[in-house]
Amino acid sequence: DMDWLPVSTSRRRQFITIGQLIDRKGINLVIDRFAQFCRLPEAEGYTLLIAGRGPSEEALKLQAKQLGLEGRILFLGFLSHRQLGHHLSESVATLVATHQDLNMVSITESVACGTPVITSTVPNTSLWISRHHLGIVDDNWGAEHMLAVATDDSYMRCCLDERPHLSCEAAAQ
């Protein structure tokens, strides 16, 4: 059932990262890389949404503050599936920096919303992302990769083309 995963071709100037706020998710790396992105003149007005909660939340908020980005990094806490789908469909990309998570449902959900993924090679879906131009896979992704996805609609179009293949009906065929 993909009803809760909306699609929008109108994107806000925002990135999103999703997951428990624990060390292995690498949210601290996402924040550092967003800070690098914010130094680019093209990054004016971009925000980073962090969806999730966990024991690292206060440390991550402090990191954002120390980088001077507390107004550009928004901690959303736990979200319902509908709320998450809404934020995913409006973001230019989902950012993933996990150290060990192989199976991440949020990657498939992102693609289903037409939102490209920027990730390392750790998740099992990284080859799928790379082969189908659903985002960028690079163990050292950074500001230049974020800018590339934010300014190139072909990644979003490829995600939208992939969406019909992600339904239960498609899997059953």
Image: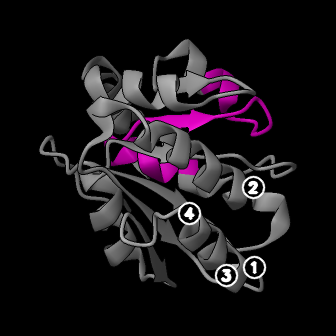
Give yes or no for contact between labels 2 and 4 (Cβ–Cβ under 8 Å).
no
User: Which of the numbered marks, if any, corresponds to residue 56?
Assistant: 1
Circle 4 packing at 10 Å, graded few (<14), some (14-19), many (20+), is many
Kindly indicate the quadrant of the structure image that contains residue 73.
bottom left
Q: Nearer the viewer, mark 1 or mark 4?
A: 1
Q: The residue tagged with tag 2: helix, strand or loop?
A: loop
Looking at the image, residue 95 sits to the left or right of residue 27; the answer is left
| Residue that label 2 marks | 26
Return the x and y of residue 107 as percentages of the image width and height.
56, 47
Residue 113 included in the magenta stretch of the image: yes
Q: CA distance from mark 2 to mark 1?
A: 10 Å
Q: CA distance from mark 2 to mark 4?
A: 11 Å
Q: CA distance from mark 3 to mark 4?
A: 13 Å
Q: Residue at x 50, y 68 (%)?
A: 50
Give yes or no for contact between labels 1 and 4 (Cβ–Cβ under 8 Å).
no
Residue 103 appears anywhere in the view: yes
Q: Residue at x 58, y 18 (%)?
A: 130
Looking at the image, residue 145 sits to the left or right of residue 53; the answer is left
In primary-sequence order, the first of circles 1 and 4 is 4
Q: Residue at x 54, y 39 (%)?
A: 36
Give yes or no for contact between labels 1 and 3 (Cβ–Cβ under 8 Å).
yes
In primary-sequence order, the first of circles 2 and 1 is 2
Circle 2 packing at 10 Å, graded few (<14), some (14-19), many (20+), is some
Q: Which residues are magenta?
A: 107-128
